[in-house]
Image: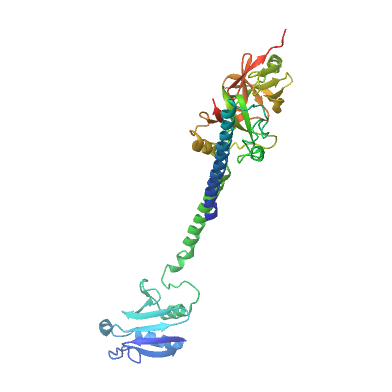
Amino acid sequence: MYRVTTSHLGPDGRRIAAASENADRGELSAQELTVLLDAFVEIDPVENEEHDPHVIAVGRGAKLIIRTSRGRLQVYDMRDHAAPGIEMNVAGILERLDRVAESASPFPGGGDLPSPTAPHRGIAFAMLLVGLALNGYILYSVFYVESVNKKPEVKLLSDADEVKTRETALAGTYATGAKTGDRVIEVTAAGGVRFYELGAKGPINDSTDTYQIGRHEGQLCLVLTNETGVIDLAGDTLVYYRDVYQKRHPSP
Amino acid sequence: MLAAAAVPALKKNAINARTSAVMNDLRVYSGAFQAYAQEHGDWPPGGGAPGVFPAGMEGYLSQTNWSRTTPIGGNYQFATQSPQGGGRYAAVIIISNSGTNLVSSDANQLTDIDRKLDDGNLSAGNFFLGYRNYPVFVLEH
């Protein structure tokens, strides 16, 4: 059933009724509406032009204004005023009035257009990706800690004979001095190294490590296993964190 | 996303808080050592391990505070005639590793302390990185 109102239309739907501005025709069946529209489409074109008669039909799926022009029916969607009128036959109008939960637009091409939610989903997805990327960057920057202890680039010596010779020559005790507060580095030929500081009551800050011999910025150095710094070699001295350690020669 | 955006601010606050705490410690401790030096004509003897209360500083320093872990890890150590960064310093306070109690190596944290306490340059001034990149606060050059 369709709720039908006519405007400026006589009872048979085929003639103009100028005085009948709006007439509620109540609930019409599909057959009755078909009869009305078949009659309406044959209305006199001159009278039609002058009085603009039309039919308003409300179904489960649409509310349509139906006008006629040159023997054809022009249909306008009352829920979408921006949509242009389109030409439809009676069967199409009935089908459109009954269609529920489909595209609101009865107009050609409407069904081919992407769903109105599709671009929104795309935008939402893009925003989600941007959000995740931003979160990742923030968390990375928060948990990334730039350390003052950076491993320098070192090229280790590969010649076993050269390594052996240098380790033997290196072995010994090196110190910044012999007073309380001075520091000592003991290097063994077996690749071991010990660090300590001369405290008031003996060695303090005592620690051990192992080393390999390499080159750092072209200069020979000891590459430590646990500590990040390198010990530069310069003749009979070691340089560690810019402090110079002189080799102690055993008393004759 | 908002929560994540708030994390950097929280991190910055944490850095600021640690910086303030370290600065406060160093001011209090340097004042105590200077008071000792004024009264005795020399610095107290160095040579103590990190976290070990400096000899002679009873009545000048709180032993509990000195021995606790610093706000940036490690322990305070007082040293005299200390070789640091190629120079030798008459008196310094070092923040050193002590066993498994390690000093922060966070460049942002250390630079923040240096900027607020000294010149912002971790290689120079009265606050710099010395032996093993331990922070050193100079009491006397």
In the image, residue B78 above or below residue A112: above
State whether residue A212 is above or below residue B51: above
Residue shown at 52% from the left, 35% from the top? B114
- Return the residue found at the far bottom: A11
Viewer-side residue, A8 vs B104? B104
How many circles with numbers are drawn on the protein? 0
Residue A240 spot, x, y in % from top left: 61, 23
Identify whether B55 is placed above or below A188.
Answer: below
Which image quadrant for residue B68?
top right
Residue A195 % position (x, y): 69, 25
**In this rendering, position of residue B134 left or right of residue A187:** left
Residue extending farthest top: A252
Q: Identify which residue, A151 or A93, lies in the foreground.
A: A151
The image shows residue B135 at horizontal and vertical percentages of: 58, 32
Give the quarter of the image for residue B21. Answer: top right
Q: Nearer the viewer, residue A148 or A159?
A: A148
Q: Is residue A169 above or below residue A24?
A: above
Q: Residue at x 35, y 90 (%)?
A: A23
> Which quadrant is home to the C terminus of chain A?
top right
Work out which residue is located at the far front of the displayed protein and give it. Answer: B39
Instruction: Judge whether residue B1 can be spotted in this image.
Output: no
Provide residue A30's location: percent of width, then percent of height.
Answer: 46, 86
Can residue A236 be seen here? yes
Colour scheme in use: rainbow
